[in-house]
Structures are given as structure tokens and as C-alpha cells.
């Protein structure tokens, strides 16, 4: 049965995605919320929220979207 993600769980993913791998994030969220969160569930929810990670094994950094106003990456978010 599919579970509805609470706002607190979504906020945890948003705050942690840049610091944790998907595997570690799923484990930590399982500890916090008291239910089992699989790596696939964590990853799918992160992707639904529009959070993309840089490719590579064990890479924790999040991809930053390019600014539509200019051709360079900028911090006008």
C-alpha cells in the first residue's frame, strides 16, 4: 500500500539530499519517521520534488539548474 509523504518527510529529503547518499538518506528518514523507507522510495520522492543529484557512486551533491535569464550559472534563485 502506498503511503502519503508528510510535509516533514519531504522537508527532510529537501534538507538532506545534498549531504547524504540516497541509501543513507533512506536509513536516516526511517529512523526519524518510524516507518521503513526504501532507497527506491526515497529516490522516487526526491525526483518527484525536482531534486536531481550529480552522477557517480557515493556522490552527495545536488545538481543546480541553470538560470533561464542568463547563459551562466548564477545565484538569482
Image: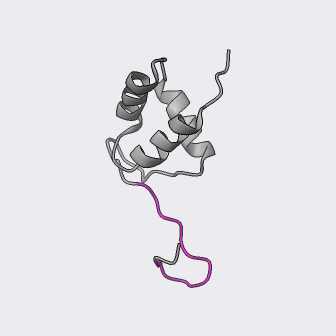
Foreground pick, 56 / 52: 52
Q: How is the image coloured?
A: one colour
Number of marks drawn: 0
Using residue 22 as the reference point, say whether residue 1 is left or right of it. Answer: right
In the picture as drawn, the residue positioned furthest to the top comes out as: 1
Q: Quadrant of the N terminus?
A: top right
The quadrant in which residue 58 appears is top left
Q: Position of residue 67 (x, y in %)?
A: 56, 76
In the picture as drawn, the residue positioned furthest to the front comes out as: 8
Query: Which residue corresponds to the image point at 43% horizontal and 48% vertical from the top-left?
Result: 15
**Where 5 falls versus 52 (above or below)?**
above
Q: Which residues are magenta?
A: 62-74
Query: Which residue corresponds to the image point at 60% horizontal and 47% vertical from the top-left?
Result: 49
- Report if residue 75 lies within the magenta region: no
In the picture as drawn, the residue positioned furthest to the bottom comes out as: 70
**Where 75 falls versus 15 (above or below)?**
below
Q: Position of residue 4 (x, y in %)?
A: 65, 27
**Magenta span: chief secondary structure:** loop
Q: Position of residue 76 (x, y in %)?
A: 51, 78
Query: Which residue corresponds to the image point at 46% horizontal and 76% vertical from the top-left?
Result: 75
Query: Which residue corresponds to the image point at 47% horizontal and 79% vertical from the top-left?
Result: 74
- Report if residue 66 lies within the magenta region: yes
Amino acid at each position: 500500500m502506498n503511503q502519503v509523504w508528510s510535509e516533514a518527510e519531504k522537508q527532510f529529503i529537501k534538507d538532506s539530499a545534498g549531504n547524504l547518499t540516497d541509501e543513507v538518506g533512506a536509513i536516516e528518514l526511517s529512523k526519524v519517521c518510524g516507518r521503513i523507507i526504501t532507497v527506491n522510495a526515497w529516490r522516487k520522492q526526491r525526483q518527484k520534488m525536482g531534486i536531481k543529484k550529480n552522477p557517480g557512486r557515493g556522490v552527495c551533491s545536488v545538481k543546480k539548474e541553470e538560470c533561464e535569464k542568463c547563459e551562466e550559472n548564477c545565484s538569482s534563485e
